[in-house]
Image: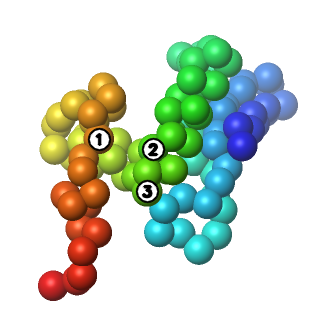
Amino acid sequence: MLRVRVTDRGHKTFFLYLRWPGARWAALREIGNEDRLPLEAAHRVAREWLAKVELGVDPHEVRRLTRSNGSLSSEQGTMPSRSSQGGGSPP
């Protein structure tokens, strides 16, 4: 579910609220703020994230990992395979 937080000064931030892969409870994840991301783009990002979650991929984790590796390939539409996410048994 796409949500918008509006401050007393009118600043708007878009969030997606759902149960993320591997989580027990639903949580908010920030998509972006209206200064850099118009509503239509926030809807597009929310749809993309929902599609990834349906596949068992946490887009927030993918973004965090790619930023720590200095690569943006996952944000440009490619997703790691399930096998590369450690979906098997623990070592």
Q: Which residue is mark 3?
A: 56
Q: Could you tell me residue 65's position as x and y percent?
A: 26, 49
In the rendered structure, which amino acid carries the disc numbered 2?
Answer: Lys
Residue at point 16%, 44% (across, down): 69
Q: Quadrant of residue 34?
A: top right
Question: How far is the residue under mark 3 from the one under mark 2?
Answer: 7 Å
Earlier sequence position, callout 1 versus callout 3: 3
| Vertical arrangement, residue 71 with respect to residue 91, above or below | above
Question: How far is the residue under mark 1 from the one under mark 3?
Answer: 11 Å
* Dots 3, 2 in contact, CB < 8 A: no
Earlier sequence position, callout 2 versus callout 1: 2
Indicate the colouring scheme: rainbow
Q: Which residue is mark 2?
A: 52
| Vertical arrangement, residue 82 with respect to residue 16, above or below | below
In the rendered structure, which amino acid carries the disc numbered 3?
Answer: Gly
Q: Could you tell me residue 15's position as x and y percent?
A: 64, 40
Q: Could you tell me residue 68's position as x and y percent?
A: 22, 46
* Observer-nearest of 71 and 18: 18
| Vertical arrangement, residue 79 with respect to residue 82, above or below | above
Residue at point 53%, 69% (across, down): 23
* Dots 1, 3 in contact, CB < 8 A: no
Q: Could you tell me residue 70's position as x and y percent?
A: 16, 37
Q: Which residue is mark 1?
A: 79
Specify few, some or many for label 3: CA neighbours under 10 Å numbering under 14, 14-19, or 20 or more.
Answer: some
In the rendered structure, which amino acid carries the disc numbered 1?
Answer: Met
| Vertical arrangement, residue 46 with respect to residue 35, above or below | below
Q: Residue furthest bottom?
A: 91
Label 2's element?
helix
* Dots 2, 1 in contact, CB < 8 A: yes
